[in-house]
């Protein structure tokens, strides 16, 4: 637990007000009690109420938002809550997703996976469509995609994909 707390990267502070710098500095002294709380929470399936509270910030999806649908909610939970969630996902969820006897159940799922991404999901869908159909028409909203980071890699990856006819517009 000490190594996890000591190597936390800077991130937003939750409603509990515990900043990363404090958790990192206090990690030699709080690692044991935090580990005890994590284990107790895991065994009893009860998450501390304070860790469930979050600050929800509306972040615009478009340049000039007007309606509620133009915003994406970003929920900032306490840091220790996120640490526990990440720990459980890595120790319990990831092994199931990549285990050979269950992987066929999750082959079309890309969220919360070590190799999951929108690019992987798109390539997966293209692969299956091209196995069924001779041609696939693909329309992407590049202005919206360009708002996200690393989206310039997507067209390059798509060009490497062996498509019969493809034009990428909107760049």
Image: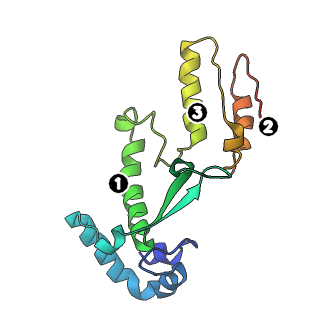
Question: Helix, strand, or loop for circle 1?
Answer: helix
Depth check, front residue: 162 or 117: 117
- The residue under the point 35% across, 37% down is 102
Question: Helix, strand, or loop for circle 2?
Answer: loop
Disc 2 vs disc 1: which is toward the camera? 2
Asked if residue 161 lies left or right of residue 42, the reply is right
Question: Helix, strand, or loop for circle 3?
Answer: helix
Image coordinates for residue 129, horizontal then vertical, percent: 55, 20
- The residue under the point 41% across, 50% down is 94
Q: Quadrant of residue 161?
A: top right
Q: CA distance from mark 3 to mark 2?
A: 18 Å
Image coordinates for residue 48, horizontal then vertical, percent: 29, 72
Disc 1 vs disc 3: which is toward the camera? 3
Q: Quadrant of residue 51?
A: bottom left
* Residue found farthest to the front: 66
Which residue in the structure is indicated by mark 2?
A: 171
Answer with mark 2 or mark 1, whichever residue precedes in sequence: 1
* Residue found farthest to the top: 134
- The residue under the point 55% across, 53% down is 71
Image coordinates for residue 42, horizontal then vertical, percent: 27, 65
Answer with mark 1 or mark 3, whichever residue precedes in sequence: 1
Which residue in the structure is indicated by mark 1?
A: 92
Image coordinates for residue 70, horizontal then vertical, percent: 57, 49
Depth check, front residue: 122 or 35: 122
Is the residue 33 above or below the residue 43 in the image? below
Q: CA distance from mark 2 to mark 1?
A: 41 Å
């Amino acid at each position: 637990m000490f190594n996890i707390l000591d190597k936390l990267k800077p991130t937003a502070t939750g409603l509990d007000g515990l900043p990363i710098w404090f958790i990192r500095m206090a990690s030699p002294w709080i690692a044991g009690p935090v580990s005890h709380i994590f284990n107790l929470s895991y065994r009893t399936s009860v998450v501390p109420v304070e860790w469930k509270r979050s600050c929800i910030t509306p972040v615009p999806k478009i340049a000039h938002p007007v309606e509620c649908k133009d915003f994406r909610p970003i929920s900032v939970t306490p840091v220790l809550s996120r640490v526990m969630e990440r720990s459980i996902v890595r120790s319990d969820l990831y092994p199931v997703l990549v285990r050979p006897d269950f992987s066929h159940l999750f082959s079309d799922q890309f969220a919360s996976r070590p190799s999951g991404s929108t690019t992987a999901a798109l390539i997966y869908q293209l692969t299956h469509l091209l196995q069924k159909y001779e041609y696939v028409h693909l329309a992407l909203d590049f202005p919206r995609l360009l708002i996200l980071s690393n989206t310039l890699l997507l067209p390059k990856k798509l060009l490497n994909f062996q498509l019969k006819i493809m034009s990428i517009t909107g760049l």
